[in-house]
Image (cartoon, rainbow, N blue to C red):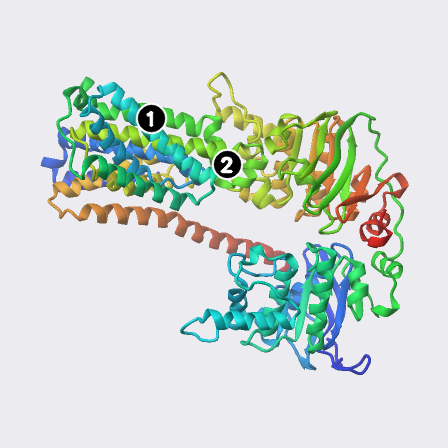
Amino acid sequence: MSALYTWVVIIIVFSIWIPETFLTTLTWENIAASQAITAMLTLGLLFPLAAGVYDLAVGQTLGFAAVLSAYLVNHGFGTASAIAVTLLAGLCVGVVNGVLIVGVRINSFIATLGVSSVLLAIVGAMSNNIQITGLPSSFERLAGAQPLGIPIAVMYLVVLAVVAWYALERSPFGRYLFAIGGAEEAARLAGVPTRRLMFAALLISSTTAALAGVVLTAKLTAGDPAAGPSYLLPAYAAAFLGATQFTPGRFNVIGALTATYLLATGVAGLQLTGAKFWVTDLFNGVVLLIALSLPMVQGRLRRRSADIAAREASSAPSGS
Amino acid sequence: MTTEVPAGERGGDAVTLALRDVTKTFPGQVAVNRVDLDLRPGQIHGLVGQNGCGKSTLIKIMAGFHAPDPGAGAWFDGEPFELGSASAAEQAGMRFIHQDLGLVPTLNTVDNLALGHGYESRRFVRLGGEARRARALLAEFGFEFDVGIPMAQLTPVQRTGVAIARAMSEQHGRRLRVLVLDEPTASFDSADVAQLFAVLRHASSRGVAILYVSHRLDEILEITHETTVLRDGRLISTVPTEELSHESLIELILGQAPEPHSGGAHVHSSEVRLSVEHLRGGPVRDVSFVVHAGEIVGLAGIVGSGRDLVPYLVGGAQRPSGGSVLVDGEPVARLTPRGALRRGLVFVPGDRQGKSAIASLAVRENLTLPRLPTRGPARWLGVRHERREASTWLERFDVRPRQPDRPLATLSGGNQQKVVLARAMRCDPRVLVIDEPVHGVDVGAKRAIYELLREATRQGVGALLASGDVDDLAAVCDRVVVLRDGIVVAELHGRDNTVDRITRETLARQNEAT
């Protein structure tokens, strides 16, 4: 729960420091909308992470989908069919990841790095590393609309979060993934179809990344070939930071969302104070490392005091 | 404290390592009780005894892993020697080769040897020179194979050869003086054994004192000069091996034949729950047996006999190369853990940490994993509902503490094992296949676990219980199937189901078999 307190502290600090810019609806709308894409990516990523599989291709899959959707609408596809084809392409990336990791049994870390590189090449080929612009207005409305005054991207996120929460925390699928992540062989011996589920988890992370890519293109009204990689670290940071919260030691939806917005609030606040551009990266990195170190150090201290207590307890009867 | 320095007291020749009055007490158990041992240069000394006789504790004391109780004495080359210190053992030139050999499986012979004696140059590794050196070293031991391929691709005896060659060629510390081998041939073919013996004879001809620990009495009789027998932690005797026969050695290991007590007093129906037909795979060559409803059938055999593999093959954890498994007369078509579970065959693996349970999940989550208590078409996994159900199981199996949300890792070994057993029973099994259910579990929990197993069979379950603990098998099982070298060599029931008979059958000589 410490993330919630930290978040409150960050908000209070900036409210006192720069009240005239920080405490505006515009700032909050901005934070909410801009982070919806990172948060969506993170939610999908939680599935392979729960099963102990690293999908490092999610960032580049997002970038690939962003460019592909723009490319398609500029090459005669309707908005709906362009989105459908893009999501399908995302699914295909997941299939490739799954075949490499579950079928061929390549270490997930390096397999998805390799796939990332291939996707980067495809993005280059489609875009010539130039933003694809001139998208139809029907496409822009995907992210620009504000029903009930709420950015629509946030609504996508809420729907996705509810589904992800159910799937990870209240469905057999999620339980099985955590079992695989805990001890793959033990899960298999308990009758869990480990390979099939790891494959499914990779399909989910890729398809969600593709969806996030479509939303990004709609929001920017351009397909940005450079967008993908910059989303990778924030998504992992949010997932791991979130795993220290609410249900410690376990990747979880609420924790990931909280972590995303905690980081985003801090970054937005720092930017409004006029800090240098690199402070963003510094803040993200430092918060992540502190948050991951704290439970480790606490655990070690707790173990040490438990050891001392046990030693005293065991020596007591022999002493008397 | 012992007083005299025992060097040369027997036979007049020198003693490399002498142990006197070594005792090791664990809470509630004396594992090693006033044991003496002399290891002489150039001699191979056998160490035998049943499981739990104190062999491994004694070795661990020698290696410095355990400190002995006060009062023990040790001399190395006649000089007082400190037991219970790993660095002292290392400095003195004592090396221990366990079954895992301590080699790096992904590295090749050259590099594994270099982990011991280093490379010729610290700055630049000349591959050709290093390979020549490795080949020459192995040739001394009668080995000739590609030194450039990784350990994982060598045969078990080749790997053992590398481990021994490395122990003998180390440059730091002192040269090899005492070599202890713990069950080195467990995964060997008989041809491999001959090659290992050649290596050991070569090592002993260079003055190394060797302690050879094995369940395989043939090997003890063939290779050793002297044999020490332990029973219940006590030294029974140390005799020149040439004075021993297979039969007399078994008598020494078992002692006075214990009260023939029969575990087969329980009634079971004639209905066959599990039948295993001509099962093959790895060291398992041809295994067939049946388990009836209401029956606990034990599976006995020494390490390497196939006893430890059969439960995995029957439970679908590992694919057999042939044979079939039938539940209630119907073959299990898809022999995977999942497929077996669907047919009511529940496999409970032995090693709790890595295989049978998931330490990072809660007790409740472990308990329900094979069959989740979901509700409705959405398969909603209600935590409150799950917690309530888990609580009743914790109650029934007397798991303590009764906290379904605790991480499993925080429970004691015995309670973890109860959770694993409860998990199996929750699947409404027809057949339970259990491997080493009480490994590392205290006495009280052990009895409780066996009672729970008996209770399960009273409800019509057929249980297969594989264990290396012969006492338990004789006490708990209605019938015991004995494996040796991958085949069934005996089925003991009624009056024959005794510790004595089971041990005899597991150890009987190869040429006596069938």
Side of A141 where A199 appears, left or right? right
Any part of residue B163 in sight: yes
Where residue B493 appears, x then y in whole percent? 86, 39
Task: Tell me the quarter of the image containing the N terminus of chain B.
Answer: bottom right
Residue ID at (52%, 38%): B406
Residue A51 falls in image quadrant: top left
Name, please, the residue furthest toward the left.
A20
Left or right: B476 in relation to A125: right
Residue where numbered disc 2 is placed: A179
The image shows residue B31 at horizontal and vertical percentages of 72, 59
Label 1 marks which chain's residue? A
Please tell me which residue lies in front, B419 or A318: B419
As measured in the structure, the alpha-carbon distance from the residue carrying label 2 to the one carrying label 1 is 29 Å
The mark found on residue B232 in the picture is none
Q: Position of residue B226 (x, y in %)?
A: 80, 70
Comparing marks 2 and 1, which lies closer to the viewer? 1
Residue holding disc 1: A88
Q: Quadrant of residue A312?
A: bottom right
Report whether residue B235 is seen: no
Disc 1 secondary structure class? helix
Q: Amino acid at mark 2?
A: Ala
Do tags 2 and 1 sit on the same chain?
yes
Q: Is residue A284 left or right of residue B335?
A: left
Give me the residue at 18% from left, 28% from top.
A219
Hey, what amino acid is under mark 1? Leu
Q: Is residue B75 above or below residue A216?
A: below
**Of pointers 2 and 1, the one earlier in the residue sequence:** 1
- Report the residue at 73% width, 59% height from top: B191
